[in-house]
């Protein structure tokens, strides 16, 4: 069968997701109310819960069902939320998911510490769970994510960044944790022969997801994404659309593009000029084309994994990650 | 016997400390050079390595000797360094230990992420070590530290903060990790009957250490501490000297003190007025007197622990924590 939309999946695993939501707030039991408040505020702003969804689908794919899942989902979502909090400080973000960002609402100081609170809360839950392989997968993911963010700060300001280095960044900052969600399913269900496949599947889904995110930052619909467009350009980040534009442009357009990229205050007009160049050189098509190989690899990996409804769901998630509009 | 100075101790355990220094840099092997660089910069600025010293003395006190110690010391020092990095961002510190602070040298963005890198690196080492009790002690310590820092941000701006709440803050931000150093010794050496004693000993040493730190911020010798005096006053933090001053002052002096505390820009003259009030009300004596009960309790705890040279060293550390001038 073929899954037609994300709502079908959300409905299929609604009990799991409800349990995860409960679990997410269960551990926000700090004596220091402010720690709970900032964490709740950020968790409540929702997000797609894509990582918990990946964990649930991958474990069910391998016929693993246990409440243990929900605690591990909380760890993953806490690590993810901690990185969001710290990223928002770095980006000076004013909004996240359409609501005022935690750093603007509570101040950078509290938010730095609340990120640390979530990291340590995640660690406590992992120690309680007690599986050293899962601990290592997630500890390594957290380390790689921090390294990736540092690397991004240094590298994406480089106009001539290579596609390889761009991929290294999005692998570290996004794909590694999604990869962990799928890999952990194999560990939980003791199906170690599928570990490498699931790890790769999660990684490629993460790359597809992040590239799409980077495309939406230029070509998305603000009403659907709830985000301001052009953030990456303003922050001087070279992401896939700009890398492809750099590689496609004729000399004259390249100079126009460069002049804007290196400007100090990029305004709406500059952004529109870039948008026109992106249209002229069919960058949207090229970017989605870039993803097609990853999608193909995902589907090949899924063919080697158990066939069931969750396999179909994961196939849809691959599609969704690369085609979602928000 | 009685230990006459800290150098005696540093010499006695010099091989351990040298091994710990090696270990501290061994794991700074990120592919992202900047992560290693910021971590090294902060670790190299030295500090007293009081936490590793406590760990070494406590384990040797219980006749435990193993290289495993050094890896755990690296975890503790990484967690400590991560909190320092994040604290410096919050305080906007320009100097730490007499050198330019990491945030001023590398920028807040990199430093936030480098703190996260050190947390996750610490976590990886803990997972590799594999003892779930030690993992839990340190995960809880990290969580308590972040909560304590949040609580401090909220509470110390309160002129009427109670001594109990002040103690709660310094317990969380300083004493909990020192307490962990001593407690871990009992876990490592399987001497669980001494666990509670060692945990308390470390906690009280931490409180003594932090109170002394708070005293030195007013009454220290800048040339010895390498820190600017009056930082806490500038940041509007009510620490023990100010709490005791508030409780000792007559109405007129209390008003003078209050006016300065609530000023926006505290200058050298304001600081000198506070210093004079601290002298007038013998706050230094009162603050050290406040510590005498903790020192007594430490010595009572030590009497119930094995008698050997390391017991003498820990007794000296109690003295040192409360009397050091830098």
Image: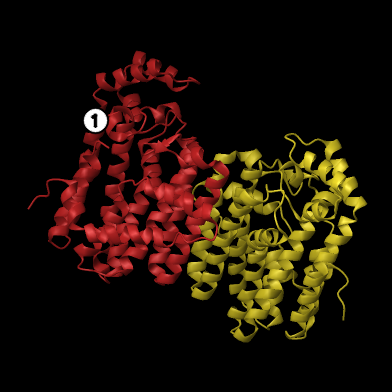
Chain colours: A yellow, B red
Q: Is B3 above or below relative to A256?
A: below
Which residue is identified by label 1?
A: B286
Displayed quadrant of residue A73: bottom right
Mark 1, secondary structure of its residue: helix
Displayed quadrant of residue B245: top left
Q: Is A305 above or below relative to B274?
A: below
Q: Residue furthest front?
A: A251
Q: Is A126 above or below relative to A158?
A: below
Q: Residue visible at 58% across and 79% down?
A: A187
Q: Residue visible at 78% across and 36% down?
A: A266
Pick whichever, B83 or B170, lies toward us. B83
Q: Residues within 10 Å of mark 1 (few under 14, many from 20)?
A: some
B272 lies left or right of A180: left
Residue under mark 1: which chain is it in?
B
Residue B15 x %, y %: 23, 61
Residue A114 x %, y %: 55, 48
Q: Residue furthest right?
A: A280
């Amino acid at each position: 069968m073929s899954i037609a939309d994300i709502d079908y999946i959300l409905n299929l695993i609604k009990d799991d997701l409800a349990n995860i939501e409960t679990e997410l707030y269960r551990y926000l039991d700090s004596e220091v109310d402010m720690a709970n408040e900032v964490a709740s505020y950020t968790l409540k702003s929702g997000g797609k819960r894509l990582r918990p969804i990946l964990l649930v689908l991958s474990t069910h794919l391998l016929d693993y069902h246990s409440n243990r899942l929900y605690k591990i989902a909380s760890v993953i979502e806490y690590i993810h939320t901690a990185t969001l909090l710290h990223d928002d400080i770095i980006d000076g973000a004013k909004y996240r998911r359409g609501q005022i960002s935690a750093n603007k609402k509570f101040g950078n100081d509290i938010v730095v510490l609340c990120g640390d609170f979530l990291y340590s809360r995640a660690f406590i839950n992992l120690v309680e769970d007690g599986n050293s392989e899962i601990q290592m997968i997630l500890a390594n993911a957290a380390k790689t994510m921090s390294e990736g963010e540092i690397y991004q700060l240094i590298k994406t300001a480089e106009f001539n960044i290579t596609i390889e280095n761009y991929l290294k960044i999005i692998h570290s900052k996004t794909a590694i944790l999604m990869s962990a969600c799928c890999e952990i399913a194999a560990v939980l269900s003791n199906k170690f022969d599928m570990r490498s496949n699931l790890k790769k599947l999660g990684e490629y889904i993460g790359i597809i997801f992040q590239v799409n995110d980077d495309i939406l930052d230029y070509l998305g619909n603000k009403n659907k994404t709830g985000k301001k467009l052009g953030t990456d350009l303003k922050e001087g980040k070279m992401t896939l659309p700009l890398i492809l534009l750099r590689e496609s442009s004729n000399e004259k357009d390249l100079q126009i593009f460069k002049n804007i990229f290196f400007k100090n205050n990029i305004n709406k007009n500059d952004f529109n000029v870039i948008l026109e160049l992106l249209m002229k050189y069919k960058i949207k098509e090229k970017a989605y084309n870039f993803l097609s190989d990853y999608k193909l690899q995902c589907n090949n990996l899924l063919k080697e994994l158990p066939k069931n409804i969750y396999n179909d769901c994961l196939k849809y998630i691959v599609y969704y990650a690369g085609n979602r509009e928000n």
